[in-house]
Amino acid sequence: MRNRTVMNSFLVTTILALTGIGFADPASETEPTQEKVESPAEIIVYSGRSESLIGPALKKYEDATGNTVKVKYGSTSGLTALLLEEGGATPAHVFIAQDAGALGALAKNRRLAPISDSVLVEVEPRFRSPAGHWVGVTGRARSVAYNTNAMNPSDMPDSIRDFTDPKWKGRIGWAPGNGSFQAFVTAMRMRDGDAKTEAWLRGIMANEAVVYPKNSAIVRALGAGEVDLGFVNHYYLYRFLSEDPEFPVKNHFLPNGDPGTLVNVAGACMPKPATPDAARVAQAEELIRFLLDEEAQTYFATTTYEYPLAKGIAPAMNMPPLSSIETPDMDLSNLDDLEGTLVMLRKVGALP
Amino acid sequence: MIELTDIKRSFGGHDVLKGVSFQIPAGQLAVLFGPSGCGKTTLLRIIAGLEHADSGTIAICGRKITGPGIRVKPEERKIGLVFQDLALFPHLTVTKNIEFGMARATNKADRTREMLELTHLESLRDRFPHELSGGEQQRVAVARALAPGPDLLLLDEPFANLDATLRCTVRRELVELLDRVGTTSIMVTHDRSEALSAAQTLLVMSRGRLLQSGSPRDLYERPSDLRVATLLGDGNLLDCEIRGGIATCCLGTVDAADRSDGQAKLFVRTEHITLEQDEEGEGTVLGSAYFGHDSMTDVGLPGGKVIQVRESQERTSNPGSTVKARICGPCTILD
Amino acid sequence: MILCLSIGLLALTPLAYLLVRTIGETGGGTKTSSFLFSLRTLEHAGTSLGLAAVVTTASTLIALFLALCTGASDLPFRRTCTVLVVCPLAIPCYVGAAVYIGTFSPGGLLGGASEILGVRYGWFSGFWASAFVLTLFTYPLAYLPIRAGLSRSDRTLLEAARSLGHSRTRAWVHGMLPQIRTSMVAGSLMVALYTLSEFGAVSMLRCNTFTRVIYLEYESAFDRTGAALSSLALVALIGLILLLGEWMRGRNTSGQTGRPARPCRWRLGRWRWLGVPGVGVVTLLSVGIPLTSIFRWWGRSHSTDPVLDAILPALVTTMVLAVVAAVVVVILALPTSMLASRYPSKLSRMIERITHIGFGLPGIVIGLALVFVVLRFLPAVYQTWGIVIAGYVILFLAQATGPLRAGFDRAPRPLEDAARTLGARWPRRLRRITIPLLVPGMSSAFLLVFISTTKELPNTLLLAPAGSHTLSTRIWQYTEEAMYAESALPALILIALSAMMVAGLVWREGMVEKTA
């Protein structure tokens, strides 16, 4: 008997301690709780973009509308997996993803509700789902960044396909583990077919491309002169340039709809609840529309250096206009075959 | 004064105590003696309240502490217990250990000094248990148990962890101390010389039962059955025939006035047989084991029977010699 | 009893779910993918085992050499050398890896080496770089048991061997090595298990062991079946190593002679000064270069404010997290330890073993398994600190059980019984007896879990709320983005914290031994 009392007191202490975590939790204020969403003025967002990038925009939305936004932050692939797992039971009204492939995968699994045309028209058709399941918010272009001390734009080949030439041996930096790079490979597979893409990957590997964990590490390495050029997203460079205008690196956008100049999007969608809910859709659309408003778009353009996708908003930092970038003509939704790309990257040994 | 009535206890279907009853008069030192596993430690823990009894009652000075519907908690029994491994609090000094049981006593300091004097621990008062010798630790344990002035003191194999040379001295000191304090005490031991020398009342237990109780001499010389007899010392079991109040065995005759005629067994302690050099004798000395203060001699008798005889040092018989064996002390007729 | 069992089983749930789910999902997998998977798996298994073999061999040899020098010879400055030799214990492997990557990068302490040797930057990566770094920072795991084994060894056997006509060397091989074999096996096993579980260093150095593969698969794919499969393969590998260890221990031949041992002392004679450079080289590589490099980067980081802005919250998070985790783990370990100490039985031993399983499992596997369980059953707590702490509990429960059990051994039942017969009711017993005796064990357990938590990387990386950082995830992030100067400060803080805690633990243990 005595022992059981001791055990019970342990149990109580344990439960107290565990619930206590919630109070000691520094991030608890931003965490959604499991309570049912009854208040019409509360919107739940899953965000694959980090709090530092999207948090201020959502705050602006709260201030402008008086609604409250509860955000669960995570990686895009992590939250995609979560949404697929949750199915119709998801509490999320809106999901903001860093990559069109993830949005495409959710659409293909019939997890998304269609967005009204009144919202969709804000963005030109190539940066939104043809079926209206998702809409791009900002654009991110693939580019070949180079060290200006090591080479000139005139040295650049016409296509990313040409970097398999042995003259680039040891000069290229890449990040095969990076999601944006993988989306580019998916685009290349759609463009050129699996056989050519595989051959290209093998060629880059034969050129002893230096592996980096991230795009930002490549740009930093370019600045330090570790490598001469690298396959990156366009906006990383501007983060370095904003700190050091003399940073010796430039972006080069390959012409003629080259897959190496793919413009991917960070976009928003509305996960579909098990039972249709018109009020919920209206609130979600209101938030998405806000993200496409001039205020939010300008904010993105000046803090993340991505391309604003709503019509009529200009990019920051004297970037070349989006219209000048010759992105391959394709439905970004079809970038959802990440699995196939991963298998290929593993097959050629670019990924373990 | 403590009184136990029909205490029973079983663990998982195994009866450890099968109904034990006894009383001990106030101020006496009783020794509970028995082989390992006979239930004596369980009995002690039941008296202390650390274990519960399945049935039976215990009363101290007329106050019932265990019984149907009554189970006074150990901390309210006023029973001191000296544990086999002493269980001194390792993080407390000698003084703090002794003071522990006197939480609310008003004359704590005086009482502690008294206990320290009584147990000759004054000079060690600020030491920690691990800085003391075995004998000193034992004295601290006794002082700690006595300090609150218990109605009853229980000692569970208190000398088990002392080496043989120290044990005798410590035991004598303890008996003197208890005598002086006058606390009713029950000591548990499986060492027969300890039991015989320390006890005022000796209680012999075996397999969960109390076999016999009384003064040590009574029990040693007149055991009620063979188990008590052999537990308390060596002896020989001889066949005998009783006829007309006289028992006849191979060593001669003894008085058996209150026994009816028939076959019986005679238990004779080894030191209650004498051997005399006698060419006519029926016994042959087979061999002898020398123990210093005495020796144990094996004697072969006609019919293959071998008896053991304890002989004093100066009278040890030579192997091979012919002897006559005679009974020279009290012996017991058993059924 | 039931509570203890449920704590133990709860700790295993994630792994069990991982297993069940993976089996369920791969049941329908296509042939090609499973073929590809098995080929890749063999490759990763080969890399993992190869790395474990190289690191274990090298660590054990270094540890043996250092233990002989500092423990059984008349080497000059033996005490100083002993302290120096265990110092790398305070440097987590991934910090070591980050520092070495920075050291060889442009502008690093040894960055010039690349230009002089004419090799491209980034050459310091892959299998051998990982083996180098892991060996440098794991050999103390083997050194400590070998050193302890040496101090228990008996030179009588050595003398016996020499009296039987063996040469000095042969006498050492036959009279000495068998005596420390058990501790050598124990030490090697620790290194091997650690290497298999290590995630940060191998990932930073791009060595394709299972832990790195699991993380990459988890990070990139929407479908986590691949990561789950690799996790299970890694768990199987660890089981294999444990069995191997069990087998080697079973053949243990080091008999104790049953007398107080007379430790060996090797007279080095003219050679005695040779041991010093040996110790010096190891110390230079494992402590000297890393610390110099860190201080150098730190001195060169021109903008300290943004770094401070990033590091201070990470430091606070790390400390709060470590304190909460240590408290929770100690509380949860209390019932199990009490059971093991006070009611030893087959069941309590089994429960203790169950909690030990978590100790052998890599943080990346626990983290992944928790992601699965949480996404499936408790999506609300996904990416909250609560789930991070749950991971720590599974990983470090066994660490707390050891010292807590020793604490309960110091406060056994008879002491409480004694207090009862002396009239003390339970609040007084708890206050005066049980708690004071339990405190040393509890604080040791607390410190152990605290250290482990501050250093932990993979579980934190996988489960921490996005956008929030601990010192360890900051170092990871900075290294990923090649921000070596920025990683210097968190690395330094982490090393200092860890060193302080280790010192505290050693001091604490010394105190406990004195009073025990």
Image (cartoon, helix red, strand yellow):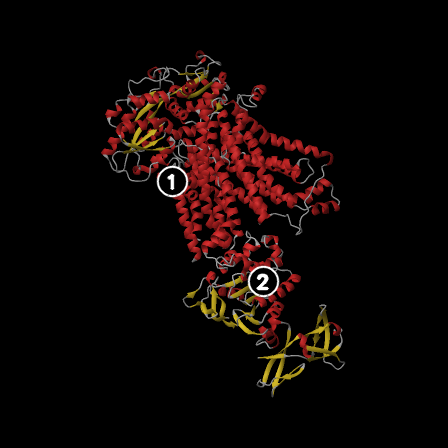
Query: Callout 1: 10 Å neighbours few (<14), some, many (20+)?
Result: some
Q: Position of residue B11 (x, y in %)?
A: 48, 64
Query: Callout 2: 10 Å neighbours few (<14), some, many (20+)?
Result: many
Q: Quadrant of residue C465?
A: top left
Q: Secondary structure at mark 1?
A: helix
Q: Are marks 2 and 1 in contact (CB under 8 Å)?
A: no
Q: Position of residue C6 (x, y in %)?
A: 42, 49
Residue beneath disc 2: B158
Residue beneath disc 1: A22
Question: Which residue corresponds to the image point at 55% horizontal and 74% vertical from the top-left?
Answer: B212
Inspect this view and state whether residue B100 appears.
Answer: yes
Q: Amino acid at mark 2?
A: Pro
Q: Nearer the viewer, residue A261 or C464?
A: C464
Tag count? 2
Label 2 and label 1: CA atoms lie apart by: 53 Å
Q: Nearer the viewer, residue C500 or C173?
A: C500
